[in-house]
Amino acid sequence: MAGRWRNDLNWSDVTPREVYLSRRRLMAGVGAAGLGAVAGPALAELGAVPSRYSTDEEPNSFEDITSYNNFYEFGTGKDDPARHAENLTTEPWTVRIDGLVDRPGDYSFEDIVRPVELEERIYRFRCVEAWSMVVPWVGFELADLLERVGVQPSARYVAFETLVRPEEMVGQRYGVLDWPYREGLRLDEAMHPLTILATGLYDEPMPKQNGAPIRLVVPWKYGFKSIKSIVRIALTEEQPPTSWNMSNGREYGFYSNVNPDVSHPRWSQATERKIGGGLFARRFPTRMFNGYGEEVADLYAGMDLAKFY
Amino acid sequence: MVDSTSISQRINGAVRRFPPGLLYLVAPFPAVWWFYQGATGGLGPEPIKALEHLCGEFALQLLVVGLAVTPLREFTGLNLIRFRRAIGVIAFSYVFLHLCVWLVLDVQILGQIWADILKRPYITIGMVGFVTLLPLAVTSNNLSVRRLGPLRWRRLHRLVYGAVLLGGVHFLMVVKGWQLEPMIYLGVIVILLAARLARRRRNPAT
């Protein structure tokens, strides 16, 4: 709002990453020499390894990615999640994995991430509202986790749910959507190597407004499919209900693949604007499957994507 | 009752000293300030949508204030009628600004603009609202009142009721899901319009 005081410091004013990393390395060296034990609390560095699935496009700034969010559990304004998500308790965190799996149960966040090697996946992110970002996610393939819990042959879909905790998630006090937030994928979509569970970005643990501690990222689908702060994963035989589809099925389909040719009742999907370009940022054409067609188009061979939108 | 009347009269007395023209002088300030903020990063990483929303919501607020002038006078004795024309003209300016931000900064592509206006109901409704306000903005001067005659002029300006209603519906439809804020706006608009209907029932002559 007008008149509200604003900090004119940007993330770019913070010590550059290389500098603080080398500073930390220096401290580690000091520690090794037996002189240390003074290192202050610093953001954990996840040490994610690069991936061949990353785009070479310029990622959005950490500030863009963490200040412009759709996370209705914390309010419907784009800046609401950044303002309210800090109240969310993410430790301890448990994900219930059940349904058609061999080893159902409550898995702690630590149990889930301990065996995996975290990768950096720099993906394009396309919101159904016709804006986009490029995000350096950190995570691992959902397929790794599904293989560990053992998917039964009859399973055909994966259902996801977000935490419901209105005392911390202030947006859940209103019936904007039918909580919990639900999403789902077909099993082959879920097993695709591009589909990841992300636990961080910019090599740091996931900011709460971006879906801490663990969220889905499906880069060829509109952003709302990439469900945040997951507490349940269930393998099912039937296509699971999904929140936006339940709220307005005419506008939001189960598949919701990025598709410039299928116009949405609210927004033309033909073009998009990358966040962070200022007041005069230009639109540019949206690509089929958000540019991931080479990897994922086969999943939909023979399907009428105007019907299965 | 006596108290509230005397308060209204005191406010009326104080307000009488302000010439309505003053409103035109301060009206551009929010727009200039928001544009400056948008250009310097003060509106967040997506300043276009922020600017669009700020202009649109301010316009709706002004339209609601304009709509409240008569009921306020009737129920509280507070008389702001001298400012109503300026409020209306400034509201229209912000509707126009909202439309310009959408056309020039947001959608940018001419073909897409037409498709949006024709195909997307909330944009169609917004455009109809804008077009409804056009004749009112054009006739918001003494000359037009004289030319049209007070009766016809007043009848023409009842179009504002429809325009405000369309504005409220436009806001409700533009948001995703069932959000509280646009519902409050629409609720207030409906109440203000209902107050007029009730009065016309009681007193059909006016």
Image (cartoon, coloured by chain):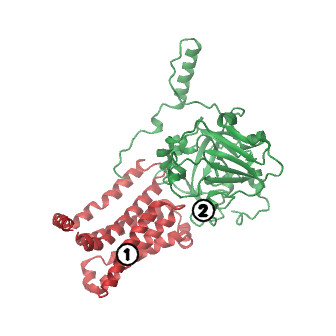
Chain colours: A green, B red
Residue at position x 37%, y 62% from top? B58
Could you tell me which chain the residue with mark 2 belongs to?
Answer: A
* CA neighbours of label 2 inside 10 A, class few (<14), some (14 to 19), many (20+): some
The image shows residue A167 at horizontal and vertical percentages of 51, 46
Residue at position x 66%, y 61% from top? A253
The image shows residue B161 at horizontal and vertical percentages of 38, 76
Instruction: Report whether residue A70 is seen.
Output: no
Residue B160: which numbered mark, if any? none
Judge by depth and name the residue closer to the eye, B68 or A35: B68
Could you tell me which chain the residue with mark 1 belongs to?
Answer: B
Judge by depth and name the residue closer to the eye, A206 or B10: B10
Tell me if B121 is positioned left or right of B151 in this view.
Answer: right
* CA neighbours of label 1 inside 10 A, class few (<14), some (14 to 19), many (20+): some
User: Which residue is most to the front?
Assistant: B1
Are dots 2 and 1 in contact, CB under 8 Å?
A: no
User: Total label count?
Assistant: 2
Which residue matches tag 1? B193
User: Which residue is most to the right?
Assistant: A153
Which residue matches tag 2? A247
Which SS class for mark 2?
Answer: helix
The image shows residue A263 at horizontal and vertical percentages of 62, 65
Q: Could you say which quadrant of the image residue A288 lies in? A: bottom right
Same subunit, labels 2 and 1: the answer reads: no
Q: Quadrant of the C terminus of chain B?
A: bottom left
